[in-house]
Image: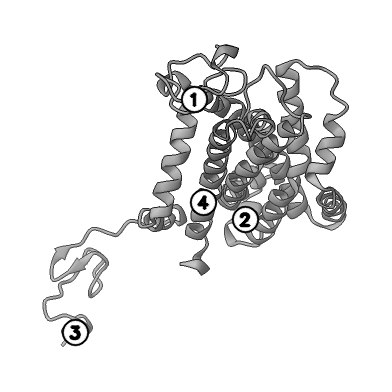
Amino acid sequence: MSDFQTVAGSEDPNARRGPSGEPNAPNQVGGTSVAPGRPRSLAGDAWRDLRRKPIFWISSALVLVVTAMAAVPALFTAADPADCLLSRQHAGPAGGAIFGYDFQGCNTYARAVYGARASLLVGALSAVLTGLIALTVGMLAGYFGRWIDAILSRVIDIVLGIPLLLAAIVLLKRVASDSATIRIAAVIFVLAVLGWTTTARVVRSSVITAKEQDYVSAARMLGASNSRIMWRHILPNTLAPAIVVLTIALGSFIAAEATLSFLGIGLKAPTISWGIDINNGRVHMRESATPLIVPSTFLALTVLAFIMLGDAIRDAFDPKLR
């Protein structure tokens, strides 16, 4: 009996010689060709895990609604948030004003809907700028190490030790202009400059782990430059944890913008912001609590949605938590 017959008889009585001439050749079982399985990726495993989590679908739905509200507020209300009449001061629900009117006679619901635009704009652009700073610093520190890592790590520690809200108050006090565009840009810049450190640390740790992998060593042996290795090979493997942190940070930035606007040093009227409306509603809370409750609820649900979404993505991408 040949070697093929001996091995094939012990493993599978129906085994036949495959194209390679070996017993039980790959993709040959009982003479029938078997399609090779598709390789599993980290993103694919994460998506399969996310699809089974109700918290992911709930938070995603809330994020989509808020995004649509910020992009096309006319889909949610036909009222003009700037149409204010003192004769309607603290009036109850009527027509399109499902939550009544505030102390200036403005539609409370319409202002809450239009307030999503400024808050989401500040949060999203702050997260993007934060990501650019964090990726640059974290990649340089993690890849080159040595004195570059030492200097950049100390910079991260210094910025991390600065209280975000306190520093933002001090810096935004220096902005004298009341222009909506300038103040929005100033808030975005301040939040990004003060809030990139946590993401940079995550990126640095991911780069340190990734640069020791075999595919990086192979690329280096083939003569790839440092910049090519960093941006073509290491960066794709560091984006997942960075995106998770930035998703959670986006909710924090929205809350920070509302806090600064509430204190009167962030966005200012006539810009419509949840923080501004919360501050105005607080002053007249005894006359009517609705102008305070409505924007506060919109703000809380938006921040909670981004934090829940970030937590769900983090759990899906972390094999230890599966």
| Residue annotated with mark 4 | 308
Indicate left or right for 312 with 179 as reference.
Answer: left
Q: Quadrant of residue 127?
A: top right
Viewer-nearest residue: 232 or 78 = 78
Comparing marks 4 and 1, which lies closer to the viewer? 1
Q: CA distance from mark 3 to mark 1?
A: 90 Å
Comparing marks 2 and 4, which lies closer to the viewer? 4
Q: Secondary structure at mark 2?
A: helix
N-term-proximal mark, 2 vs 1? 1
N-term-proximal mark, 4 vs 1? 1
Q: Amino acid at mark 3?
A: Ser
Viewer-nearest residue: 240 or 167 = 167
Question: Residue 216, labelled with which disc?
Answer: 2
Q: Secondary structure at mark 3?
A: loop
| Residue annotated with mark 1 | 100
Comparing marks 3 and 4, which lies closer to the viewer? 4
Q: Amino acid at mark 2?
A: Val
Taking the image as drawn, is residue 196 in sight? yes
Q: CA distance from mark 4 to mark 1?
A: 31 Å
Q: Secondary structure at mark 4?
A: helix
| Residue annotated with mark 3 | 2
Q: CA distance from mark 2 to mark 3?
A: 45 Å
